[in-house]
């Protein structure tokens, strides 16, 4: 990338790790950070994550050819509005949100046509990070994204130079660039992020404060807590659910089909069929967990990211619509093994 300055808006383990990766280049970029939480920004500077910090997001973006917005989804629209007038012509603006379509709409409406927006979603290698959530700057490191995927969803007006810069950014942090269509990205997210959150909401509505709850709650323990932990007022999952509702509804339909089938099996009181279903569910989860522990991204045994196509091939597939069904939404694999 032909610049010596990057701006990072929002400080969390992912954005801090990207900053540390950028710092380890042979010719490090100047890193300017902003976080509305002043103690967090000051801590990041004290730990050498940022060279400078600014008290306003627009000021952090001045002179930067790379701008990474790593704010909660509910804040990104406001951040785009705040930084728009300060963006350098030709700059690449990206983000780290786990939902891409609404962010792309905000970028199209709020960012100037002189910059390129490419949605970003860094995914650490599961063999490195495990299942525990990344919570603080203590979890950040230049190696956090090594062997991971860095998903990119380019906006239609993004320049070829911006797309090349994304590949460069992924490689700087040790991840493999993975270009895909924004619709497909959010459709995939609906199954593994949105649907579990929706199930948590439904479970709470079906139990808490319903008839018998006063006695039921005496039995509620770790299993119930784990099944409902996706409901968190301090996070923006509820906003993500609504903004991704079309994809969520498709996955919900598949889930309801499975629930109807399970209801039939239970009503039939066929213990052998139920035993087979339970055993199959255990095997599916164990298979997924084993793949995750090994950092395996593909069912065919591809370890790490060695089976991820090159950036050029990914872009070709995306443009031709071969990364999933564009006409009928994301491919429904809910009935697959």
Image: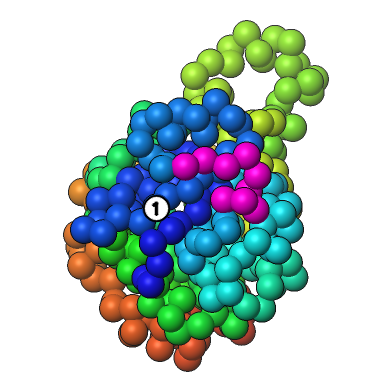
Q: Residue at x 58, y 74 (%)?
A: 89
Tell me the residue at 40%/88% (across/down).
316
Foreground residue among 179 and 289: 179
Residue bounds of the magenta highlight: 52-60
> Residue 87's quadrant in the figure?
bottom right
Image position of 146 with respect to 93: above or below: above
Residue 161 lies left or right of residue 56; in this view the side is left
- Asked if one can make out residue 225 in the rendered structure from this viewpoint, the answer is yes
Q: Does the stretch in magenta take in 56?
A: yes
Residue 117, percent from left and from top: 57, 71
Residue 122 at x, y = what percent?
Answer: 41, 55
**Quadrant of the image containing the C terminus:** bottom left
Judge whether residue 18 is colored magenta. Answer: no
Residues packed near mark 1 inside 10 Å, few (<14), some (14 to 19) or many (20 plus): some
206 to the left or right of 69: right
**Could you tell me residue 179's position as x and y percent?**
42, 73
- 233 and 225: which one is in front? 233
Q: Vertically, is 246 above or below 116?
A: above
Q: Quadrant of the N terminus?
A: bottom left
Residue underneath mark 1: 30
Identify whether 129 is placed above or below 330: above
Q: Is residue 171 left or right of residue 88?
A: left
- Judged from the image, the secondary structure of the residue bearing numbered disc 1 is strand
Question: Which residue of the protein is positioned furthest toward the bottom in this rendering?
Answer: 320
- From the viewer's side, name the closer residue of 229 and 279: 229
For the question of whether residue 182 can be seen, the reply is: no
| Residue appearing at x 66%, y 78% in the figure | 113
- Depth check: give the residue in front, 106 or 307: 106
How many numbered marks appear? Answer: 1
Q: Position of residue 24 (x, y in %)?
A: 25, 51
């Amino acid at each position: 990338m032909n610049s010596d300055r990057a701006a990072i808006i929002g400080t969390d383990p992912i954005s801090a790790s990207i900053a540390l990766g950028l710092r380890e280049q042979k010719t490090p970029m100047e890193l300017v950070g902003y976080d509305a939480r002043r103690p967090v920004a000051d801590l990041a500077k004290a730990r050498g994550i940022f060279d400078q910090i600014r008290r306003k997001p627009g000021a952090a973006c001045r002179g930067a050819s790379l701008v990474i917005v790593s704010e909660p989804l509910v804040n990104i629209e406001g951040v785009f509005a705040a930084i728009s007038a300060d963006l350098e012509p030709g700059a690449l603006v990206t983000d780290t949100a786990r939902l891409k379509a609404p962010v792309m709409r905000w970028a199209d409406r709020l960012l100037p046509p002189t910059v390129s927006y490419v949605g970003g979603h860094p995914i650490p290698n599961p063999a490195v990070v495990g299942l525990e959530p990344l919570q603080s700057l203590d979890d950040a490191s230049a190696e956090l994204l090594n062997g991971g995927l860095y998903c990119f969803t380019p906006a239609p007006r993004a320049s070829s130079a911006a797309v090349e810069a994304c590949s460069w950014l992924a490689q700087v942090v040790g991840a493999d660039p993975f270009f895909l269509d924004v619709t497909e990205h959010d459709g995939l997210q609906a199954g593994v992020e949105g649907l579990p959150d929706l199930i948590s909401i439904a479970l709470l509505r079906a139990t808490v404060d319903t008839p018998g709850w006063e006695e039921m709650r005496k039995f509620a323990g770790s299993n119930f807590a784990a099944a409902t932990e996706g409901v968190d007022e301090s996070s923006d999952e509820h906003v993500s659910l609504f903004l991704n509702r079309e994809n969520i509804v498709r996955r919900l339909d598949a889930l309801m089909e499975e629930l109807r089938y399970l209801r039939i099996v239970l009503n039939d009181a066929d213990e052998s069929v139920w035993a087979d279903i339970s055993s199959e569910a255990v095997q599916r989860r164990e298979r997924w967990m084993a793949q995750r522990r090994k950092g395996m991204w593909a069912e065919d045994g591809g370890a790490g990211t060695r089976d991820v196509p090159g950036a050029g091939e990914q872009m070709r597939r995306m443009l031709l619509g071969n990364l999933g069904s564009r006409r009928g939404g994301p491919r429904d694999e809910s009935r697959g093994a």
